[in-house]
Amino acid sequence: MKMIRGTLKLVLILYICAALSGVYVLSASARITPHDGGDDTMLITIEKGDTLWDLCQEYLKDPLQWRELSKYNDFTNPHLIYPGEQLRIPIAMAKDAVDGAEEKLVAQQEELEKLKVELAESEATRDKLEAEISALNESMGKLKAQLKALEDSLKSQKELMTAVTDSGNEIASGVKKSLEATQTAILNDIAQVNEQLAKLGEMVKEHKMAEEATQDVIASIQADVKMFLASIEANQKAINEVKMMLEDAKGVHEEPSTSKRALVFLTTAAAGIGWFIMSSIGGRGE
């Protein structure tokens, strides 16, 4: 009889240990325990590499809100979360995040339109400067041709002057005076043409500097447009993902996993059998 009772006590101890270990394993595996929630919250599943910080950035658009999750979940350690666990997210905060993101998106789109207008104006300014530079270069070409003709004429006048001077007669003296007057007029025309060429050259230089500055502005605006387009695309994608998630989350509530259900069942069964054996021992002892 004593041997039977000793065996029963050993079995009882083993069942109690099994029950206690089951409770321990169950509690240890539940690093995140979501609270009961209604339509104002949703459950998400943790994936490899997730952190509360990153999840709040993804779903709430503010990583600093991670402490708010403790209102909807119990954490054994908020810094240790594992793939496969479920986390309850407040839909209201997610909706607010979406609203804020959409407002930001509208502002970005408005800024993008302003940049496009500014870009078009800058490109028009650049095209105008290029046309003006082309016209100035054409005018300079004409003036240079005129200058060449004047210089050739002056050379001819000088040759004629030399020939008249060598003749030494009275008629030559009158012709010489006329040639001198013509040479003076040609020299004045040459001076005026050179002055105009200098002014045109300065204008071309200024226009080219303005064109280069405008091109730099255009390049900067194009970079800003590219950045805004990428940001708008990313924000729109994130907003659509959160909206789909909110839509899919309607009516979703936490369901215990099969493994947890089995563990709870075994734990309960072990405790029940232990209680039965304890009662049996007590009854025989009497």
Image (spheres, grey):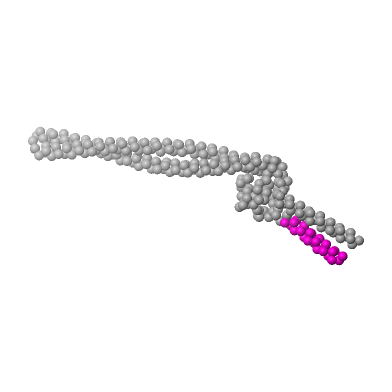
Chief secondary structure of the magenta span?
A: helix
**How many dots with numbers?**
0
Tell me which corner region of the image, top left, top right, bottom left or bottom right, holds residue 98: top right
Magenta residue span = 1-25
Indicate left or right for 59 with 147 as reference: right
Specify whether residue 267 is in view.
Answer: yes
- Seen at 19% across and 35% down, the residue is 182
**Magenta stretch encompasses residue 24:** yes
Instruction: Name the quadrant of the N terminus.
Output: bottom right
Q: Is residue 222 above or below residue 266?
A: above
Q: Is residue 127 above or below residue 33?
A: above
Please name whichever residue, 283 or 122, is drawn nearer the observer in this view of the structure: 283
Residue 80 is situated, as x and y percent measured from the top left of the image, at 66, 55
Indicate left or right for 86 with 182 as reference: right
Residue 3 is situated, as x and y percent measured from the top left of the image, at 84, 66
Looking at this rendering, what residue extends furthest in the bottom direction?
2
Residue 31 is situated, as x and y percent measured from the top left of the image, at 69, 53
